[in-house]
Amino acid sequence: MRNPIDRLLGNLPRPLRVFLDWALTIVGAIAIVLAIKAWVVNPYRIPTSSMEPTLHCARPGPGCEARFSDRVLADRVSYHFRSPHRGEIIVFETPKRAREVCAGSSGSSVFVKRLIGLPGETVVEKQGFVSIGGKRLNETYIKPGRRDVRSGKWKVPEGEYFFMGDNRGESCDSRDWGAVPRKNLIGPVFFTYWPPNRIAIH
């Protein structure tokens, strides 16, 4: 039984059929890749030191520890079916205020940071340690020497999320420019795929 493409192209000269067959195959493959990037997963590069050493950026960037920036994959599907979880590393569209406040971020369309405060919560930082609802968070992902010395208190509006970098002393985050609306969230980082020595599941 002939497939629809064969029936459609069957009367054309063979060289033209071969060309069109290849062209349709290539176009179809590109369409699949673009669809996956738009709706399923998308790759991102870590441009700054705000998540060091959990996620590396490349030297000679300020505070960067690696020769190559980490490349990560973000899941664009999960948040259509569930709410974001505290502690997840999330890719989100850069809020306008963040572009204004954070040096070197004017060209960054997305940020990658860790979710700390959920809608309606009050985030308290005291000498680098974070508490929510009077309970200190067990932040094992913060390495010695990466905590900040600042203190502050922030109320997270309903429908918004509060983000901080793991490199607290060098992170321009929600403490500086406020919470992020749910609609800005793209998805959680689930995999580091480059460079090879950094491959990891998150």
Image (cartoon, helix red, strand yellow):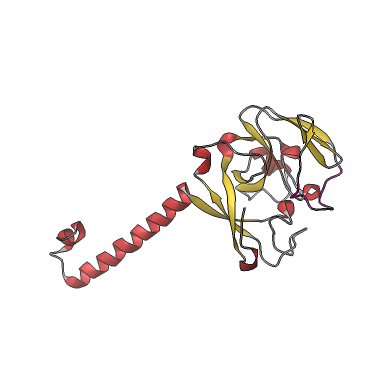
**181 drawn magenta:** no
* Relative to 33, 101 lies left or right: right
Residue 169 percent across, percent down from the top left: 81, 48
Residue 176 percent across, percent down from the top left: 75, 39
The residue stretch that appears in magenta? 140-149
Residue 113 percent across, percent down from the top left: 67, 46
* Relative to 21, 193 lies left or right: right
* Relative to 155, 22 lies left or right: left
Residue 156: quarter of image:
top right
**Which residue does the image show at 64% across and 67% down from the upper left?**
197
Q: Which of 29 and 23 is in front in this view?
A: 29
Q: Nearer the viewer, residue 36 or 202?
A: 202
**Which residue does the image show at 70% across and 63% down from the upper left?**
58
**Which residue does the image show at 21% across and 69% down from the upper left?**
16
Residue 6 percent across, percent down from the top left: 18, 62
Residue 7: quarter of image:
bottom left
Residue at the far bottom in the pictured view: 15
Decide whether the magenta segment is chiefly helix, strand or loop: loop
Position of the N terminus, as image quadrant, is: bottom left
Residue at the far left in the pictured view: 11
Residue 94: quarter of image:
top right
Vertical relation: 57 (above or below) 127: below
Vertical relation: 83 (above or below) 62: above
**145 drawn magenta:** yes
